Image: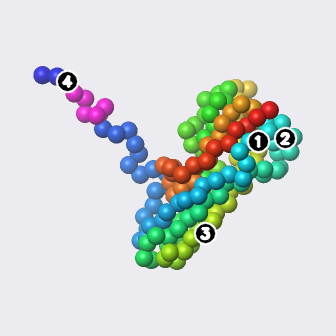
Amino acid sequence: MKYVSRYLAVPNDALFPFGHGLTYTTFKYASVSLSRGQLSAGDLTANPMAQPVVATAEVTNTGSREGTEIVECYVNVRGASTEQPVRNLKGFARVSLKPGESRTVHFPLGFNELSFYNAKAQRTVEPDTRYTVYVGGSSTAEQSATFDMKQ
């Protein structure tokens, strides 16, 4: 008889991901976009208070009841000198919508939201990295947009 592990044969996902909540209505996310496709690491470091990238998404109440949704913005960094988490929560907004109503939500992103700690424990942004911004109702948000960090 062949040995089969029941632990490896099941999905490795959280039963209730971060941000998962209960409501009496449903929400749909669409049109996730960024105000820019590229950003200069030097410009962002020189002016850390600026927020040169704005992520936007349209949220629609698709249910038959009024409801409130917590819209969450996550950032993923690829190509950094140190390994980064798959998703970091960088912003959220509470949106109350009537049935069928839509609203566009904006998340300004600057040095505080886009930087990470390098091997020397310094907050930095690095050129030649790719950022993916996810917007949705939980940490499993699928709607995303990307931009590149250049010199």
* Residue type, label 2: Asp
* Residue type, label 4: Tyr
* Circle 2: element type: helix
The answer to whether marks 2 and 1 mark residues whose Cβ atoms lie closer than 8 Å is yes
Q: Tell me the residue at 75%/32% (across/down).
A: 127
CA–CA distance between discs 4 and 2? 57 Å
CA–CA distance between discs 3 and 4? 53 Å
Q: Tell me the residue at 45%/61% (across/down).
A: 21
Q: Tell me which label, 1 or 4, sits earlier in the chain.
A: 4
Instruction: State the residue position of label 1.
Output: 39
Seen from the viewer's position, the closer of residues 38 and 114 is: 38
* Circle 4: element type: loop
* Residue type, label 1: Leu
Instruction: State the residue position of label 3.
Output: 103
Instruction: State the residue position of label 4.
Output: 3
- Residue 18 highlighted magenta (yes or no): no
- The colour scheme used to paint the residues is rainbow
Q: Tell me which label, 3 or 4, sits earlier in the chain.
A: 4
CA–CA distance between discs 1 and 4? 52 Å
**Tag shown at residue 43:** 2
CA–CA distance between discs 3 and 1? 27 Å
